[in-house]
Image (tube, rainbow, N blue to C red):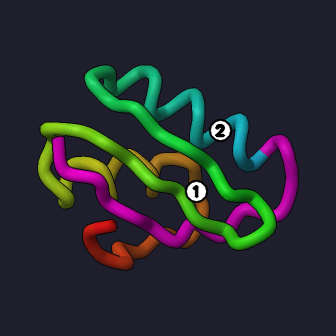
Amino acid sequence: MPKHEFFVDMTCEGCSGAVTRVLNKLGGVQFEIDLPNKKVSIESEHNVDTLLDTLKKTGKDASYLGEK
């Protein structure tokens, strides 16, 4: 499965909790959250646009950094 890295403007545990919630709702993803560096690494068959749109549902700024 491809692994993608995203920037998400997370500042606290609540932010990372929101990311966890939206990704778990999407399903079919394995992810790691790096809160200090504001990065989320996602392994998924979903396309990048779907993943980015999902991350933006948290209300945080999010952008795609590239494949890992």
Q: Which residue is mark 2?
A: 18
Q: What x and y, as percent, mark residue 33?
A: 62, 49
Label pair 2/1, CB-CB below 8 angstroms: yes
Q: Secondary structure at mark 2?
A: helix
Residue 29 vs residue 62, the one in the foreground: 29
Judged left or right of residue 34, residue 41 is left
- Label located before the other in sequence (2 or 1): 2
Range drawn in magenta: 1-14
Residue 48 vs residue 44, the one in the foreground: 44
Residue at (13% x, 51% y) in the render: 47
Judged left or right of residue 28, residue 31 is right
Residue at (67% x, 57% y) in the render: 34
> Label 1 is placed on what type of residue?
Gly
Residue at (71% x, 72% y) in the render: 37
Q: What x and y, as percent, mark residue 8?
A: 57, 66
Which quadrant, please, contains the N terminus?
Answer: top left
Q: Secondary structure at mark 1?
A: loop
Q: CA distance from mark 2 to mark 1?
A: 9 Å
Judged left or right of residue 47, residue 6 is right
Q: Which residue is mark 1?
A: 59
Label 2 Cα crowd, 10 Å radius (few <14 / some 14-19 / many 20+): some
Which quadrant, please, contains the C terminus?
Answer: bottom left
